[in-house]
Image (cartoon, helix red, strand yellow):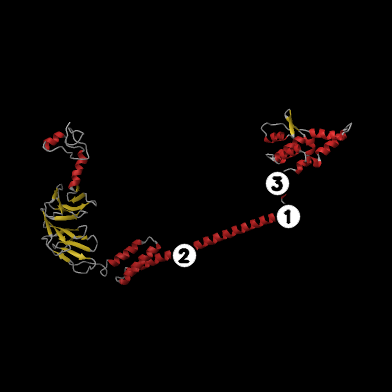
Amino acid sequence: MQRLCHAIAEQKRGSWSQADTDAVVTSTFFGEMSEQDHNLQFVRDMLIKRAPDPTRVLATYREIRLGRHPVRDEEQSLVKAHLKLSGIVRREQDVLRVRNPIYTGVFDYRWVQEHWPVHWIKRIPPAVLGLMASLLIIVVLLAMFARTQQHLAQQHQETAMKAIASAKEQKRLRLISLAQALAARAVRKNDDQGALLARQAYLFHQQSQSHVLDQMDDALRTLLSSSYFSNVLWGHESGVWFVAFSPDGQMLASGSRDNTVRLWDLRQPTAAPTVLRGHAEVVWSVAFNPDGQTLASGSADNTVRLWDLRQPTAAPTVLRGHEKAVYSVAFSPDGQTLVSGSRDKTVRLWDLRQPTAVPTVLWGHQRVVWSVAFSPDGQTLAAGSLDQTIFIWIARTETLAEKICQQVWRNLTLDEWRQFVGEDLPYARTCPNLPAGEGISAEGPGTTP
């Protein structure tokens, strides 16, 4: 308004018509002059550059300018608040209107259309759009071609995989058939050729991963149990009652009714065995100690004999104590203890560090003790008897002593100590891990309340 007044004052006319005023307004605010007006420039920037949403701002302004129907003001509307802030509209009661005719003339319908936001695609020249469309079509065609080729390649791969799987299955079935045929033929030949056929049948069985192992096993066992292959050890003059392998598997010991123990070198199974003589009756059992250097034998002559296999022809150590035949012997895992079971209904433990010492005798069975065995840790001993029972014993004395504390769960009282041990020896806890007995001060052993 100040600028209009200034422009009118510069004209220095005595009288003004409406046409004269319109001419001054047009020359001052419209056309190129509108670009120089700071206020108009501010409004223009608010409408198109600083607008939060130019499209909605221009659309709302256009609707207000047209005035076809009232545009009500809304406090929560960001667009309408922005239009009011720009100054182009004002609130009249509850309706928004263009602030003045100058704004209406400058920011007219044509101006709104010229500054209406255009989608970026519409800004692209038609020639460029055509090129982009062509490129897009090419990309789509290439993608379709690649997809088709991928699908074909996948089909070819699946076909190839099926062919490979079919070939493998055909080979597997052929190997199964061949293995069965070779196994059937092998059992009819008791010679090297039959043995090789049986082994080859087994190898084909492994390759084919078939479920006909029984036929392969039968063929192998049939061939190897024939007289052509089997290792029959001859030498005993009467029935063999017991056999045992050495820990390294290279020696076999046998006890016989001919009163002898024989040692067979399995590396030379046809060689004559070493004969260990000394028992006066049937040898019922034999056992190697864990290091394989000692052999124990139990006999109907009521003795156990220990043979030093480093000097097998030397006289054995004789363990006496059983009153009847010894049917079973076994070494402890550490080799320091031997257990024997006898017809005299007892089990005896022999300390091999003192082999001639009197053994520990375990009673309980009512009839013959047929078998004995140590647990793998050597702590427990089992014995089986004709009385239909199996007895389980603690093998070591120190373990027995420890078990007492686990069972009674107390120590001797002071009175019990004085009664059974005496007053000349200071009180000590029989079970060190348990509290002292009644009558003993907590201050320490040997003290009284």
Name of the residue lying farthest toward the right: 14
Q: Mark 2 sits on what residue?
A: 167
- Residue 127's label in the rendered image is 1
Give the vertical position of 178 relative to 17 (above or below).
below
| Measured Cα–Cα span from mark 2 to mark 3 | 62 Å
Question: x%, y% of residue 443?
Answer: 20, 34
Q: Residue at 71% across / 33% down in the picture?
A: 84
Secondary structure beneath label 1: helix
Q: Nearer the viewer, mark 1 or mark 2?
A: 1
Residue at mark 3 to residue at mark 1: CA–CA distance = 17 Å
Distance Cα–Cα, label 1 vs label 2: 59 Å
Tell me where residue 205 appears, x and y as whole percent.
37, 64
The residue carrying mark 3 is 119
Amino acid on which the number 1 mark rests in the picture = Ala
Answer whether residue 405 is visible to the viewer in this image. yes
Nearer to us of marks 2 and 3 is 3
